[in-house]
Image (cartoon, rainbow, N blue to C red):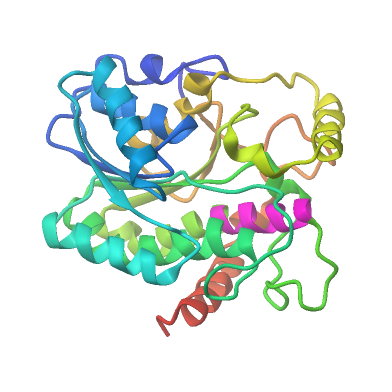
Amino acid sequence: MSDFGPSSTTDDVLAGLDLSGRRAVITGASTGLGEETARALAAHGASITLAVRDVARGNAAADRIRASVPHADLEVGVLELASLASVRAFAADFLSRHSTIDMLINNAGIMACPQSTTVDGFELQFGTNHLGHFLLSVLLAPALVAGAPSRLVSLSSYGHVSSDVDLDDWNFERTAYDPFRAYGRAKTANALLAVGFQRRYGDRGVQAFSVHPGGIRTELGRHMTPEMSALIAERAAKRAGFGWKTIPQGAATSVWAATAAELDGHGGAYLEDCHVSAVTEEKYPTEGVRAYALDGARADALWELSERLVGLA
């Protein structure tokens, strides 16, 4: 699909592109992959809305970006994905000031946290990683349609291979909670969001993709105990060719998903290393995506459930 690969960086992917006049909304943009995604797109002329939990940290990220990209057009907005009220407030404020979006990059996420719930009572990883982004995406969909051709990018993960979504027990009310299983469910949901969004908005000029950024050491792993980290290392060792990426390498597939012309016509795909992934059922695959994470019927069922849970149906 491209001349890029696992070692490519955001600057490699965007070389020669002029994104002037285009606006990107990026969640979790105060650090790590989100900040780098914002920096790279801003460096090529895009206007960026940094959607962050903490305004002070968001402003600090904006200052760091401006230090390397003096002409950067940035704004910071408050978004707490674990609160549906906050998602609605962010969307309403954004739409009061902007009529179009060219790129919505659902980058924020949490991983392997202790069992807890969102403000609205949903299991924390499913509620934050999926439901918050689902509601945000639906509320901002009119702006994506108005900005068409546009892109939605949903950050999934290799972690999706550990579990399909559970449409009957999303809150672990009947299943013993396991932080990695919960993460796997949420990351599968992120992939299915792209599939579902493509099915609903693809014919209106919006293409949606899910992305596995690779293994990167970021704040995503802040909840993991030493035992969890050891387990991750053990699983990684079983994957031939696994290697840690830098943050610019990890964000490369996100910006490729948001901008690459060669992806036209491939909406709904799961991407990694700046390529469209093939379906795999290997236990510890080097690369690839589980079939259940691309299943249209599964995506529709999750969409309908999500609409009910967030109060859209």
- Magenta residues, dominant SS class: helix
Quadrant showing the C terminus? bottom left
Quarter-of-image position of residue 203: bottom left
Query: For this view, does 50 lie left or right of residue 193?
Result: left
Query: For this view, does 310 lie left or right of residue 294?
Result: left
In the image shown, does 50 or 245 lie closer to the viewer?
A: 50
Q: Position of residue 288 (x, y in %)?
A: 67, 37
Magenta segment includes 184: yes
Quarter-of-image position of residue 200: bottom left
Magenta segment includes 163: no
Query: For this view, does 33 lie left or right of residue 185?
Result: left
In the image shown, does 277 or 165 lie closer to the viewer?
A: 165
Number of callouts:
0
Residue at image location 42% in from the left, 60% down from the top: 197
Residue at image location 53% in from the left, 26% down from the top: 250
The stretch in magenta equals 179-190
